[in-house]
Every structure is written in structure tokens, then in C-alpha cells.
Amino acid sequence: MRPIGILGGTFDPVHFGHLRPALELLETLGLAEVRLIPCGQPPHRSPPRAAAAARLAMLELALAGQPGLRVDTRELERPGPSYMVDTLASLRAELGPTPLCLLLGTDALLGLPGWHRWQELVQLAHLVVMHRPGWELSAAPAPLAQLLAAQRVQDPAALTAQPAGAILFQPVTQLEISATAIRAMIAAGHSPRYLLPEAVWEWIRANELYT
Ligand code: ATP
């Protein structure tokens, strides 16, 4: 059974630093699909600047016409804080033993021990870490370092051999792009063009977002 990739984020706005790694992992790991899951209420950070409907509209524009990448709106439909452990549990209930791969940037991996019931995440899914520029693993806190020592694998075949439990580091094209920087550029009157899909940038301008 081919694994399904899960990329959660605020997508405020979606940019090529999300999209390019998602497509590369879809293809290099032979995933059945990658679901981009916009967060409803982020539990670990300040609320997104753009409303849920706007973040969803931008994601749909970004993914239009790309087979294998799709939006999953379950976190927007669920009331309360959007805990990834609840999201993975609901996917697991729907998809049975299909392997699930939670795709994380290195920054997100280092913050994992702060996530709600974080030790259950790797019981529900594999973790696939996409290298993000500027983040070093030597900074991993002790409980995370222990988890990595116990569950890190080198061979992507582990992702199909079992439904969950492996941690794989997979190189992706490194793109030093962040939504924070894009919002700051727009607020300063500068253009974020070529950092995100043109259709998303047009939508942002038409709706006067982040100004
Ligand atoms: P913000 O700047 O608002 O924090 P962001 O650009 O980091 O946003 P998120 O929506 O918070 O984007 O990120 C969702 C996921 O995508 C996280 O796992 C994050 O590590 C990953 N990610 C974001 N940008 C990149 C990038 N340039 N390269 C690799 N992974 C990325």
C-alpha cells in the first residue's frame, strides 16, 4: 500500500517552500498523494493573519491542476485547537492500515516536543523530515534525540513496510522561503513575486491581504 503524505501548516500564505518539497516527496517516495491540511486554530503560535477561507482559497489556487497534491479541510471543520494528534487519529480511523507520513520541516521537527501528545504522533504516522535551511539537528532536545535514536531509518522501504513508526530524513530542494517573510514584504510594499505561485500572488493583491 502506497503511503499518504500529510503536510500541515498555516499556509498564511502557501509558498514554493511548501509546494516544491511536497511534490518532490510525492515523487521520490512514491506516495499515493500528499494532503495539505490547513490549520484551523494553531495551538502553538499566534492566530494566522488571513482567515481560514482565504488560506483555503490560496491553497486551492496553488494546487489546481497538480495531480497527487490535494487540500484536506478537516482541521478547518473541527472546532477548538487544531492538534495534529487528533488529525492523524481521524485519518487513521478513515484509512485503516494505510501508511501515513507526516511531513515536517526541520524547524517543525525541533519543536515537536512542544506539541500536544507528541509521543503519540509517531504511533499514528511515520515522520518524514524535509531538510530546511538554517536548522541544525544538533539542537534537538533530549526527548526528541532519544526518539530519533530509536526510530530513525535510512531506507524509505520502511515507510511501506508498516503503517507508522519510522522517522526518515529525506533531502528536498532547499528553498529559503517563509510565509512570515512574504507577509513582511507585502506589508513593506515590496513584491513577493517568484516566491509563491503567481495565481496566489494575484489573489492576495485582488483581496488586499497582508497590507
Ligand atoms: P510562518 O513563516 O508563518 O511560520 P511557514 O512559511 O513556516 O510559516 P507553515 O505553514 O507554518 O509555513 O509551515 C508548514 C510546514 O511546512 C512546516 O512543517 C514547515 O516546517 C514546512 N515549511 C515551511 N516553509 C518551508 C521551507 N521553505 N522549506 C521546507 N519546509 C518548509
Image (cartoon, helix red, strand yellow):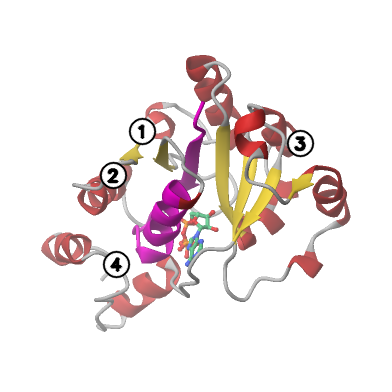
Q: Which residue is label 4 attached to?
A: 196
Residue drawn at 49 percent across, 40 percent down: 6
Distance from label 1 to label 3 (Cα)? 24 Å
Q: Which residue is label 2 attached to?
A: 56
In the rendered image, the vertical position of residue 63 relative to residue 124, given as above or below: below
Q: In this view, does 72 lie to the left or right of 30?
A: left
In the rendered image, the vertical position of residue 3 relative to residue 90, given as above or below: below
Q: Which amino acid does label 1 sit on?
A: Thr
Q: Earlier in the sequence, mark 1 or mark 3?
A: 1
- The percent position of residue 181, horizontal first and vertical second, equals 42, 74
Q: Earlier in the sequence, mark 2 or mark 3?
A: 2
Q: Write down the region rendered in magenta.
A: 1-27
Q: Which residue is label 1 attached to?
A: 73
- The percent position of residue 191, horizontal first and vertical second, equals 24, 80
Is residue 14 inside the magenta stretch? yes
**SS type, badge 2:** helix
